[in-house]
Every structure is written in structure tokens, then in C-alpha cells.
Amino acid sequence: MLMLVNLYFSISALAETECKQAIRDIYASKSPAVVQISALTINPYRMDDRVNLATGSGFIIDSNGLVITNSHVVFGAQSLSITLNDGTKLPAKLLGADPILDLAVLHIPVPNKGKLPMLTLGNSDAIRPGDEVVIIGNPMGLDRTITSGIISAINRILHNRPRMLSRAVIQTDAPINPGNSGGPMLNRCGDVIGITSAILGNAQNIGFAIPSNLAGAVVAELVDNGRLIRPWFGIDGNLINAEMKEIFALPLADGFLVEAVEPNSPAGLAGIAGGRIPVKVGFQSLIMGGDIIVEINDIKLKDLDSLMRGFNLIRIGAQLRLKISRDGKVFTKELTITERPLQPGDVPESSQYFSVQKEQESSAGKPALRP
């Protein structure tokens, strides 16, 4: 296991200042740290077209040879290699990947010359809509291509990922294409403020990047553990509020309405029931008929604040005592939180078998592509 003695993750102080480096200067100084990733994947469940060779992007962040990219670029690949700026081709080892956040860390051997170009993770919390950005990557296999644009929006939620685990991403109008995945989005200081991750199908220049602060917070865990360790409750649903009670005109108890329960999860093993009846009123969509969690360890779930306090108790090994309302009756269930395993829905087919250009359906019904 690679030691993180010299892991370079300083959040650049320049991110808080106004920078206006010329784009051509950013390209000249930063593109050498951008790499092209080749991945060979074999799908053992197919009779034809079992072998797939695909390419993506990544960038070097550490003198020991750590490379950040997207999980969907490398997850499940049997063979990985990286091509450096000078054409050197090196074998790559996957140290850790998280399909939910779509982040992965690779390691490459340091060439004999002993020095690798590196990029710095900037402060993605400092960005605002309208800020100028540049993207460097390998779209359609065209190595070290640069495009530019602006931050179109921040805190976007991509609903083609597990809803309870969704994270906000950056939206940009900078052109992104298949092969850009895993490449850096840079501000005009030349700092990485995002990792290119997805595009919206049937749209013009609507792309998304994972914030650099999120990447910086999880890389060490990916390297140390090979994965992100998450507690597993195993439910999905919505907090019941006054508006819901008014819309549905039902005697709903205050609490968290369980819409779905993951099989073999702590909640599933405890016998908590999900919903059965899909209902949509205006923009409000729910699955009714499931249990309502009224309390978690004596915390009454009556508003967002109490819900967050209750959910903050969900840690691996924690013992939870739940008060449940079902069909007008209230009873208690106890369960123990375990580590969340990888679920089928966490890994899109495009990631499992490396068809990286396969469409992913978003909640709006439009395909969200992994470029």
C-alpha cells in the first residue's frame, strides 16, 4: 500500500484571490500533468463484444505518482495504463474507487528521471457562477485538448446516483466530450477546482464536474482502504411535513416516510417496510404505504433539524432504537448499523463493463452521459 507521506493536498490560497492568467499560459504550465488513461475491460457475461478498450483523462497530484480520475473510467478494468505528456506509457494500479462519488485514485511508477508534473487542488467553495474555467483532457482520444467556458451553476444534484448519497456538483458550459472524464477543471489561477465527470445528453454544453474540495477530502481514504466506508441504514424516503399532510389529506404521523428499503440492509433485516403506492401531485412524487419512522433513539423526527440529528447517529456499529408508525399502530424496532456494501444501482452498466459512452437516464428523463 502506497504511503501518503508526501501527498500534496494543500488548498491553494490563490483560490480566494482574483486570477487572470492567460489561458494559453495555463495550458502551457498545467497540461503536462494531465494524462491519458487506457482501460481494457472484459465482460464475461457476453458472447460477443466482450472486450472493450476505452480511454479517459486524469491528472497527477503527487510526486509519488498518484493520479485522480473518475471511477467510471477505471472501475472493473482488467488492465490500466497511462500515457504521460512526453508520450511515456506506464502501467497503472487502481488504489481505490468510489462509483457513487465517481472518483478514483491510481498509482503510476515514477519514471527514471524522477520528477512528475503535478496539479494543485484549489478551493471549490470559492467559485461562483460566471467564473471562467478551462478544461484539459483527451476528448475522443485527442490528447491534451483545452476548452474554456464559465461556471454555469453550483450545487447541482445529479439524480442518476443513489438519492440518499447524492452530492452537489459544478455545472459548466465549457465543452466536454467522451474522453474528458476524469480530467481537471481549472480556474484562471491554474488550480483544479473540479474533476470532469458527466454531460447532459440532448443538450448543448451542459457538463458537470466533481468539486475539488470533495475530491481532496476522500482521496486519502480511497488510497488507505481502496473504497469509501459508509454506514448502512438501508432506507430511502422523505420527511413528512405540513404541506404533505395538506396535499394528501391523510392522517400521517410526523416523521420520516420510508419509501424504499434496500434488501439485506439493517432496515430490511429489522422488518421495516417500504411503500407500495406511487403518488404524484404537481411536482411532489412519493411512494405511499410504507412505515413512518417517528423517533430515532428518542429524537422525535418532526422537522429537518431533528431529522439531521437523528441521521447523525447512523454510524457503523451504532445501535438504533426506532419508533415506527404502521397502519395507525406504533411499535419499536432495534437494529445495528453496518458498513454499506456496493449496490447494483451504485455502478451503472457503463461503469461495470466500460461502455463509457452509454446513456444514463436522469430524473428528468434526459440522458446524462459519462464522457
Image (cartoon, rainbow, N blue to C red):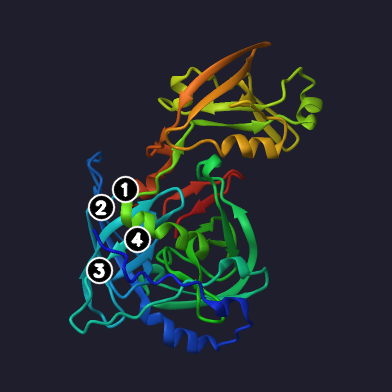
Residue tagged 3? 108
Q: Residue at coordinates 43% horizontally, 82% vertically from top-left?
A: 30
Classify 10 Å Cα crowding around label 3: few (below 14), some (14-19), many (20 and above): some
Structural distance between the alpha carbons of marks 1 and 4: 19 Å
Residue tagged 4? 105
Structural distance between the alpha carbons of marks 1 and 2: 6 Å
Classify 10 Å Cα crowding around label 2: few (below 14), some (14-19), many (20 and above): many
Q: Residue furthest left?
A: 112
* Closer to us: 146 or 84: 84
Q: Which corner quadrant holds the C terminus?
A: bottom left
* Closer to us: 284 or 169: 169
The image position of residue 26, as x and y in percent, is 49, 85
Tell me the kind of residue under disc 1: Tyr
* Closer to us: 366 or 339: 339
Structural distance between the alpha carbons of marks 2 and 4: 18 Å
Tell me the kind of residue under disc 4: Val
Q: Nearer the viewer, mark 1 or mark 4?
A: 4
Structural distance between the alpha carbons of marks 3 and 4: 10 Å
The image position of residue 19, as x and y in percent, is 60, 84
Residue tagged 2? 41
Q: Are marks 1 and 3 in contact (CB under 8 Å)?
A: no
Residue tagged 1? 353
Tell me the kind of residue under disc 3: Ile
